[in-house]
Image: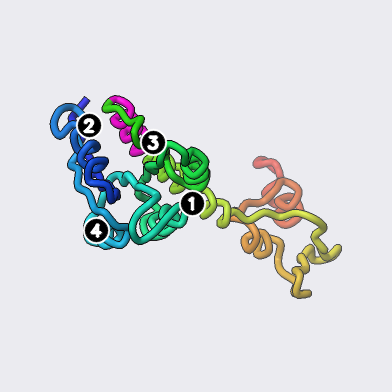
Amino acid sequence: MSPQSFSLLVVEDNPADADLIHELLPGTGPVSFQVESVSRLSDALARLERLAIDLVLLDLGLPDTQGLPTFHRLRASVPDVPVIVLTGTDDDEQGIAAVREGAQDYLVKGQISGPLLLRAACYAVERQKMTEALRQAKTIAVAALAQVKTLSGLLPICAGCKKIRDGQNYWHQVETYIAMHTDAQFTHGICPACAKKYFPELDKPLNS
């Protein structure tokens, strides 16, 4: 496997917690992280506007915002960036709520180890890639379905000339109507019955 390097933004106002995350994530090796930190959500949003970041570790309790609105504001600004929420020891409910609303994971401060943080970070990035791939596939599928035209229900057709009446009471040739409502393309030929009717000479034996 080729080495992978990710940029990670820690949004944490406690310098000790921010420094711990720096220490726990490898800066070199098969999987490495380039870590930087800010202490306010406003600084994080400004940083994310300037340069792309692969992953955000977000404390929900910051000097300029508290609780789930912290995640909501970040998510609204960068919906495609994976986020791991950092919570206090008594904030499991907020962490679960954030995951329910789009965070990739949550970690409880004071219970974070190096292997746990590394695994959560790698999984968050990969899950976000899968989510984006599924979103793109859905967009393509929806666009394709929008182009599919089908015929259903009763089609008023003239018993004489075989024209079809549309919903606006206009009459169309069968091939015109079908072309308007499907992706079928027409090629022309002649059936044996019509060949005998319109070109009877073609039906005579060659030695007659």
First in sequence: mark 3 or mark 4?
Answer: 4
Q: Residue at x 80, y 60 (%)?
A: 155
Amino acid type, residue under disc 1 in the picture: Thr
Camera-nearest label, 2 or 4: 2
Amino acid type, residue under disc 3 in the picture: Leu
Q: Percent position (x, y) of residue 103?
A: 43, 44
First in sequence: mark 2 or mark 4?
Answer: 2
Give whichever of 152, 119 is nearer the camera: 119
Report helix, strand or loop for mark 4: helix
Check disc 2 and report the residue beneath it: 24
Check disc 3 and report the residue beneath it: 107
Q: Which residue lies furthest to the right in this view?
A: 159
Q: Percent position (x, y) of residue 53?
A: 26, 49
**How far apart in space, not on screen, are marks 1 and 3 (Cα)?**
32 Å
Report helix, strand or loop for mark 3: strand
**How far apart in space, not on screen, are marks 2 and 3 (Cα)?**
14 Å
7 drawn magenta = no
Check disc 1 and report the residue beneath it: 139
* Mark 1 crowd level (few <14, some 14–19, many ≥20, 10 Å Cα): few
**How far apart in space, not on screen, are marks 1 and 2 (Cα)?**
38 Å
First in sequence: mark 1 or mark 3?
Answer: 3
Camera-nearest label, 4 or 1: 4
**How far apart in space, not on screen, are marks 2 and 4 (Cα)?**
23 Å
**How far apart in space, not on screen, are marks 3 and 4 (Cα)?**
23 Å
Report helix, strand or loop for mark 1: helix
Q: Is residue 113 left or right of residue 157?
A: left
Q: In this view, does 165 lie to the left or right of 19?
A: right
Quarter of the N terminus within the rendering: top left
